[in-house]
Amino acid sequence: MEINKVVLRKMNLELKSPFQTSFGVQKERDFMIIELHSDNHIGYGECVASAKPLYSEETVGTVELMLEEFLIPALMNKKDIKHPDELSEIFKPFRRNNMAKAALEGAYWDLFAKENNIPLYKALGGTKSEIEVGVSIGIQKSLEDLIKVVEGFVDEGYKRIKLKIQPGYDLDILEGIRKQFPNIDMMADANSAYTLEDIDLFKKMDNLNLMMIEQPLAHDDIIDHSKLQNEIKSSICLDESIHSLEDAKKAIELESCKIINIKIGRVGGLTEAKKIHNYCESKGIPVWCGGMLESGIGRAHNIAISSLPNFTLPGDTAASSRYWNEDIISPEVTVQNGTIQLPSSAGIGYEPNDTLMDKYTTSIKEVFPKKILS
Ligand code: OSB
Ligand code: MG
C-alpha cells in the first residue's frame, strides 16, 4: 500500500450547545484530521486531543509536533507493512502520545479497508450490523433544565443516559432524574472529580440503580478505585485510567472496575482497542465505546469498533445532530430507536464532504512528501 501524500488539517467546529464537565466547559471543538493519500483512495483519521490538556495531557499542538517529527516519519520509513496491526509496534518506541498515534493509525486502517474494498468494521472483525447508543449529557444550570434535556434525548430513543457530575452537582441531581425517569438506563460520569473521602456519597448512589459510575477518582489511579469498588454495589467503569491493554489487565486484576470504557484515542489506536476488547471478553468484563465530541470522521471509527461482540453496553457515539449544526461527512450519523446501522461501503463508510471540510479547516499542510522551500 503506497502512501504518496500526507495532509494535516486543523479544524474547528462550534458545538450546538456548550458541553460542561467537572474539568471545564467546551463551546467549540478544535481537532486535527489526518489524510493519507494513495493513488486511488484517501484514508481519514481524527485526532481527539483538545485545545487544552484538561482531559489528558495531549493537545492539538502536541499531536501536531509528535506526528510531524516522529510518527509520520516512522511510518513513511517503514517499507513492508502488510497489515495495520503492525503500526502500534512501529510507534511503540515513542512513549505515550496515544491520541497522536491513534489518529495516524486510524487513517491507515481506513485506507487499508478502502484499498481492500471492505467496510472498516469488517476489517476489524466486527460482527454486528447495528449498534446501540446512549448519550452523554453535560452539567446544566439546574435540575429543571437537566430534566428537559434528558426528556428530549429519551424521546429521541437513546438507550442510555449518562449524566456528568461534580461535587455539589451529584446526588440530588441523580435522585431528581431517577424520580422523574424511574425506568431509564442511566449512569454518572465524574471525570475524576472525587477522592476516597467521598465514599459515603458513592454508597448513597447505590440506591439509584445506576448502570455504572464512570471514573469517580483520580485520572491516573487504579488503587483507590479498587478500594471504592470494594465498598459499593454500583459498578465502577474506568475511562481516564486506561491507556493500554496492560492498564486494563492491572485494573481488572485489582478489581478496580467491573466495566471498561474504550476510547480509541486514549488507548493509542484501533489495534490496542481490539486487544483490550478481546481481553475483557475473556474475563467477562463488558466494554463500551466512549466519545470525545468527535466530528463524523472520528465518530465513524467509533461506530466501526463498536461492532465487535463484547461492546455489549450502549456507547457515547450519538448522532451528528447531537453535536453539530452540520457535520463534515455525508451521510451524517443518524440514530433510530437508539441504534446506528453499520455502513456497508468500504472504509469508514461515511464520505467527508470536501466543501464542508474546507469550510471548517483553519489551517492545512502537506507534511509528506516534505517540501523544501529555499
Ligand atoms: O469523559 O467520556 C468523557 C467528552 C469529552 C471528554 C471526555 C468525555 C466526554 C463525554 C462526551 O462524555 C462523549 C461524547 O458524546 O462524545
Ligand atoms: Mg468519561
Image: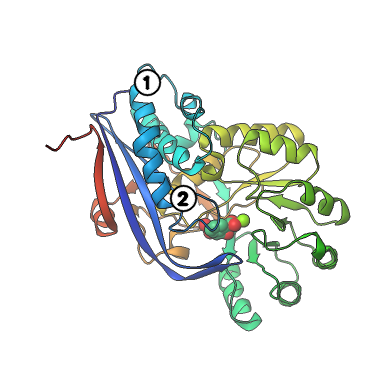
Position above or below: 117 against 254: above
Q: Residue 312: image x %, image y %?
A: 66, 45
Q: 358 left or right of 227?
A: left
Residue with the mark numbered 1: 78
Q: Which residue is mark 2?
A: 48
364 left or right, relative to 373: right
Q: Residue 102, how many percent across, how many down?
A: 47, 39
Is residue 159 in view?
Answer: yes
Q: Residue sitting at 57 percent across and 55 percent down?
A: 316
Where residue 218 appears, x then y in whole percent? 69, 55
Please identify the quarter of the rendering in which residue 134 is found. bottom right
Distance (Cα) linking label 1 and label 2: 25 Å
Residue at 81% x, 43% y is 255
Pointer 2 local density, CA inside 10 Å: few below 14, some 14–19, many at least 20: many
Q: Quadrant of ligand 1?
A: bottom right
Of the pair 122 and 253, the residue shown nearer to us? 253
Mark 1: few/some/many CA within 10 Å (<14, 14-19, 20+): few
Q: Quadrant of residue 28?
A: bottom left
